Amino acid sequence: MGTLAAWYLRNADQAVTVLRRQGPARLDKTLCFADGRPAQALTLPVIAPAALRAPIRRLIVACKTPYTDDALAGLPLAGDLTVLRLQNGLGSLEGRLPGAATLIEVVTTTAVKGQHPEHEIVAENHSWMGGPATPPAWFETLARHWPGLAWSDAIRERQWHKLIANAVINPLTALHDVANGRLLEDPALHAEAAALAAEADTLLRRLDPHWPGDSLPQVMAVVRATAGNTSSMRADAQRGAVTEIDAINGWLLRQAATLGLALPNHERIVAAVRERHPIGKQ
């Protein structure tokens, strides 16, 4: 998603630089769009954080959540920093930004799949930004170049809906090494999904009495729409990479702990993911 966001920003005449501690001095990618549009080449300059000569005022954080601290380490962040957060889960930037920073959360249903180090497959859908009371001055221009992008005054609700979907689909498909659609086909996995969704709804109602709950049908709609897909956590597990369990189900458990609320199904699945994939322990 970071690569795709950079593409949209470049189309909106914004300069984009990749921060990377080592490697080539430029990033070359080809974006292949699922709707059949011609492939687009994207070349971005790369700079090491140590070479920066001025504080960063606009930053996109799009790395996997376990790498957030490493990505931010040593960056000269301006006091009036604006951050776009394109990450799964919640809480990854808490306590990590200057006190006066503006955090804009991004929720998207667009899919970007890396089929090759130089190629990304893009299936565009809908994206929302929100957080501040009003959109920044540059938002309208960017929205003209970012298909399906809208400003949301209810970004937290959108985040929570996506969080529950991720908290159900990701760990179950990672643990059982199955495509998303298996959660519809296998009665035992469907029952586990229902239990996870119900627990999450119980917590979110405690955090916000207006939370509508009954999230399972929405989760299953996502499963149905992505039935043949491999979830990001399953893909991470398959290649032995660190998982994002701590920012997804782990966030739910941390919120529950502050309320003295038990979420036994989420506790079990977090423990199972960490046992199966020790590298993912946080």
Image (tube, rainbow, N blue to C red):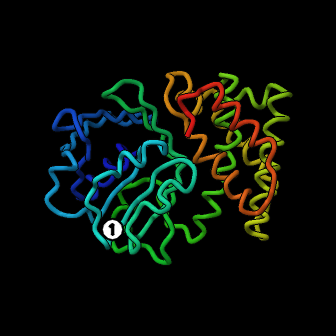
In the picture provided, is 27 more to the left or to the right than 63? left
Is residue 232 visible in the rendered image? The answer is: no
Is residue 118 visible in the rendered image? The answer is: yes
Looking at this view, is 156 or 7 the one in front?
A: 156
* Image-quadrant location for residue 177: top right
The residue at the point 35 percent across, 43 percent down is 3
The residue at the point 20 percent across, 45 percent down is 48
Q: Quadrant of the N terminus?
A: top left
Q: Quadrant of the C terminus?
A: top right
Looking at this view, is 37 or 43 the one in front?
A: 43
Q: Is residue 15 above or below residue 219?
A: below
The crowding category of the residue bearing disc 1, from other C-alpha atoms within 10 Å (few below 14, some 14 to 19, many at least 20), is: some
Percent of width and height locating residue 65? 48, 45
Query: Where is mark 1, residue-wise?
Result: 81
* Mark 1 residue type: Leu
**Local SS, label 1:** strand
Percent of width and height locating residue 39? 32, 33
Looking at this view, is 202 or 30 the one in front?
A: 202
The residue at the point 18 percent across, 33 percent down is 24
Percent of width and height locating residue 90? 57, 54
The residue at the point 35 percent across, 52 percent down is 72
* Image-quadrant location for residue 9: bottom left
Percent of width and height locating residue 225? 66, 37
Looking at this view, is 42 or 211 the one in front?
A: 211
In the picture provided, is 10 more to the left or to the right than 170? left
Q: Is residue 224 above or below residue 164?
A: above
Q: Is residue 34 above or below residue 131?
A: above
